[in-house]
Image (spheres, rainbow, N blue to C red):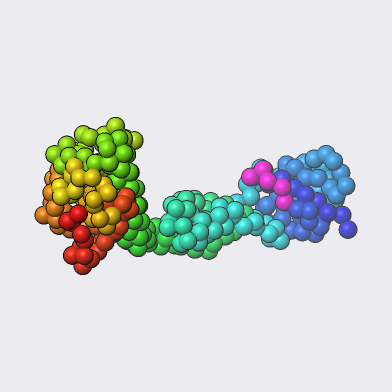
Amino acid sequence: MATYTIIGGDQKEYGPIPANDLRQWIADGRANAQTKTRAEGASEWKVLADFPEFADVLPNSPPPRLTSVPAGIPSRTSGLAVTSLVLGILGMFSCGLTALFGLILGIVAMLKVKNSRGALSGHGLALAGTIVSGVALLMIPVFAAMMLPALAAAKQKAQAINCVNNGKQLALAVKIYSTDHTNHFPPATTWCDAITDMVGAPKIFQCPSAHSDSRCGYAFNAKIAGLDEDEINPSTVMIFESDAGWNASGGPELMIGKPRHSRVFMVALADGSVQQLRESQLATLRWDP
């Protein structure tokens, strides 16, 4: 049985369909004498009036505009609707990063499906994508609230590591000074000035958690200043965290009252080692050489 393909008023192809179905389309007003038609196996398009087999059913009427998909022609699923749903689902696992695009595409997809007059399907997918994307966007504050404590803890840990590195470099600079000055530690009142040339950069004097305008976030144990290194117990405090400023020296009275990071205090000892101590452990520190 011969089949035919037509071009509707929306300039889209419909078919192939058998002659009986095309006759029904003509009777329903979906095709007329001027409708472009191609028979099965033919390469050129003709108007329907050029096919004598339909002459008996063709009325004289203007070219039709197909306002809906003819019966028997399956509609295709909107790709935007599918993409919207996928992006919405991904947004639940990416802290909402893809959800905004999913929401926009879902709305666009619903409009396109509605205006396609049956040529597109997927309104339910688009609606689901819009809803899921919207929920993912609403979850962003929740995701942020969950992540902030972890980020804050990571920042504190990084600052603590940086502070320990500072302590090690300052202690090493003091040791180098001692080697260059007949094995004696620097004077208490100018210890920062004395080791500046041995320190790689000015920021080594600055604790990452201290006030940004503080030139130095550490103090020197005044009781070991100027002493012969060999006469000092290796476990004696050398450098500790303090807000007293540049060239500050003294004892435990200058130590910061609260830990700056990760609930620990950084202390460098006379042997060059660095310890991180909790407040309950500060009483065990040795200050006298």
Which residues lie in the magenta part? 10-14
Give yes or no for residue 125 being in the magenta stretch: no
Q: Nearer the viewer, residue 130 or 45?
A: 130
Quadrant the N terminus occupies: bottom right
Tell me where residue 50 sits by quadrant: top right
Query: Farthest residue toward the bottom?
Result: 280
Vertical relation: 145 (above or below) 241: below
Where is residue 52 shown, x and y percent of the image? 85, 47
Q: Nearer the viewer, residue 287 or 182?
A: 182
Quadrant the C terminus occupies: bottom left
Where is residue 284 shown, x and y percent of the image? 21, 65
- Name the residue at 47% across, 61% down: 93
Is 252 on the left-hand or right-hand side of 136? left
Q: Is residue 156 visible?
A: no
Give yes or no for residue 13 being in the magenta stretch: yes
Vertical relation: 216 (above or below) 232: above
Where is residue 164 shown, x and y percent of the image? 32, 51
- Name the residue at 33% across, 47% down: 168
Q: Nearer the viewer, residue 115 or 237?
A: 237
